[in-house]
Structure formats: structure tokens, C-alpha cells
Image: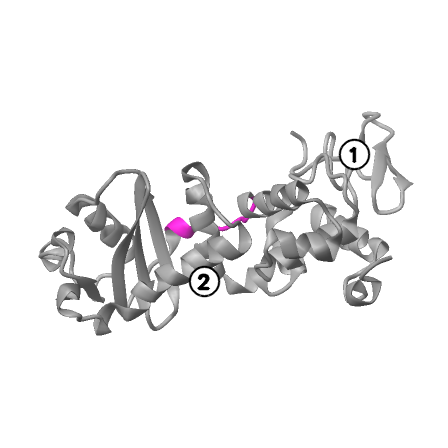
Amino acid sequence: MPNAKALSQFPNEKQVLRELQRIIFGKHVKCPHCQRQIYVIELKKNRLWRCRKCRKRFSITSVNWLKGMKISGTKLWMLVWCWQQKLGVLQVSGLCLTSIPTIRRYYELFRDNLQINCDDIILEGIVQMDEMFVKGAFILGAKDIIRKRIKMNVVFKKSPEKHDAMNMIFQHVKPGSTLFTDGSKIYRKSEDWWPITHKSECHSKFEFSQTSEVEGMWGVLRTFIRRMYHHVTLKKLVKIIAEFEARFSFKELFKYALNFLKNSLSSVPLAF
């Protein structure tokens, strides 16, 4: 097999299926339709089962977002690792010998099934805030300088208004924090609306020291999109931004493929 030596670092098919079984069903496999365990018989090792009571078959891919998976377990593991390492689709195609449409489909599945809630992110201490414009929308972004956490909101309007900025501050900036922004009018007198210390600088006068990190974040975002996806439509922008947020604020999910699979493939719900 081409690339066999380089790919030997990944677990084999048997190991992957065993891990997936543990994640989805736990120590003991129960029927997801009737909850019974004693009637379950194994048809294929770590892959397919049948319940003698309700006479239904089920597998590790029939009860979650892996339904319809036509690639091997090892290749799934490889694609998760490549996605975590932010490898572009062309690079992954050469490594995994997989078509680009397949890679894009699984990248989208991974992104859509991150079991995290970025709406609960709270920034505190020293927070920098700024906005970036794209065609048909703009992105409000804020960064916690000490804890290196970020929060972004996509607003589908041509230009931001004061209430857009204030809503983000209300929801994601902890009272008592110090907020640094540019001189835009949408941030003026923020301290009158929320208990924060607000400081601003004028970019037209080449003042960038207090907002340098959040300004640099936009460059990181653009590089991330170009490297992994080459482009993004407005329809998918919210999900792409959510993935970018997760990579900053939940880094443990992107260290190992097993961490992500445990997060996204939660135990199967029993007794529908």
C-alpha cells in the first residue's frame, strides 16, 4: 500500500472498531431499540449486532452521525487526525488516497458534530474587541488576552450598529474587565451600559498597541480558511467560525483523534 510506512502510526482496523464500540455502547452492548443486553448477539466482531427480542440489527455506525459511512475505521481515524492538524484537502487527498469530495464531506461532519457550546464562553480580565467585514456580513470578535480564549459573532448585515457590539459585551465580557477597542462609534460609552473599564485607540493615527492581538486574530482566521477550505460560502460561515472558536478555547479536543471521537460520538440513546 502506498504511504504504508508513514501511516503505520495510526491504529489498525481492529483497534479502531474496538475503540468506537467502547465510545458508543460502553462496556456492554445493549440494543438501542429495546434496551436489552442479554438478547444481543454479535454478528461481526466489534461492528454488527442483532437483538433476538426485537429482531433488529444495529452497528457502530447506524446510531450516530457515522450512518452511511463507506470508509474503513482506520481511514476515519486518519481523517480526524488530519482535520485536527488543519491539513488542507489537497494534502489529505495525497496522504489518505481519498477523493476531495469525501474529505470535504467528513470535514463538514466533524465540524457539525463538535459537542461544545461556544455561547457559554466568558472573557475576562483584559479583553480586546474588533470587527472584520466580509461580503454580505461582518464578524464581531473579542479575545481574552490572558487566557487566550476568543468569541466571535457573525452578523448578516452590511455594517455593525451599537446594539450588536453591546449585545456581545453583555453576553461574553465579564463585569469588571478592561475592554480595549478601536475608536468606532459602536463602542463609545460602553462603560455606561456595562460595568467595565473601556479604553480605545485611533487606528487612523497608527495606534495599534492595545488591540494588536485581536487585529492579528483576523489574519489567523483568513489563513485557517485558506489552508483548510480554500474558500467559504456565507451559508457555512457560522459553522466555520464556530470551529475556529473551538480550536482556540477547547484545545484538548484537537490534540488526539480519540478525544474528538469521545466528544462527538456520545453513548447511544436507548429506548427511542
Q: Give left or right: position of 223 versus 20.
A: left
Q: Position of residue 91 (x, y in %)?
A: 65, 57
Question: Predominant secondary structure in magenta?
Answer: loop
Q: Is residue 32 visible?
A: yes
Q: Is residue 139 above or below residue 36?
A: below
Question: Which x, y percent locates residue 68?
Answer: 72, 34
Vertically, is 81 above or below 168?
below
Q: Is residue 200 left or right of residue 27?
A: left
From the top left corner, tell me how far across and down residue 243 is, in percent: 48, 52
Q: Is residue 49 magenta?
A: no
Question: Residue 13, how many percent across, how many down?
Answer: 83, 53
Q: Which residue is mark 2?
A: 248
Which residue appears at 30% of the width and 64% of the height?
A: 215
Is 117 one of the magenta-colored residues? yes
In screen coordinates, is 183 left or right of 218? left
Nearer to the camera, 104 or 161: 104
Amino acid residing under circle 1:
Phe
Label 2 vs 1, first from the N-terminus: 1
**Where does label 1 land, which residue?**
58
Q: Helix or strand or loop: what does disc 1 sit on?
A: strand
Chain part drawn in magenta: 113-119
Please tell me which residue is depicted at 81% across the width and 25% down the height of the picture.
54
Quadrant of the snapshot with the C terminus: top right
Label 2 sits on a secondary structure element that is: helix
Furthest-top residue in this view: 54
What's the residue type where badge 2 is placed? Phe
Residue that appears at 34% across and 66% down: 216
Which residue does the image show at 42% across and 50% down from the upper left? Answer: 241
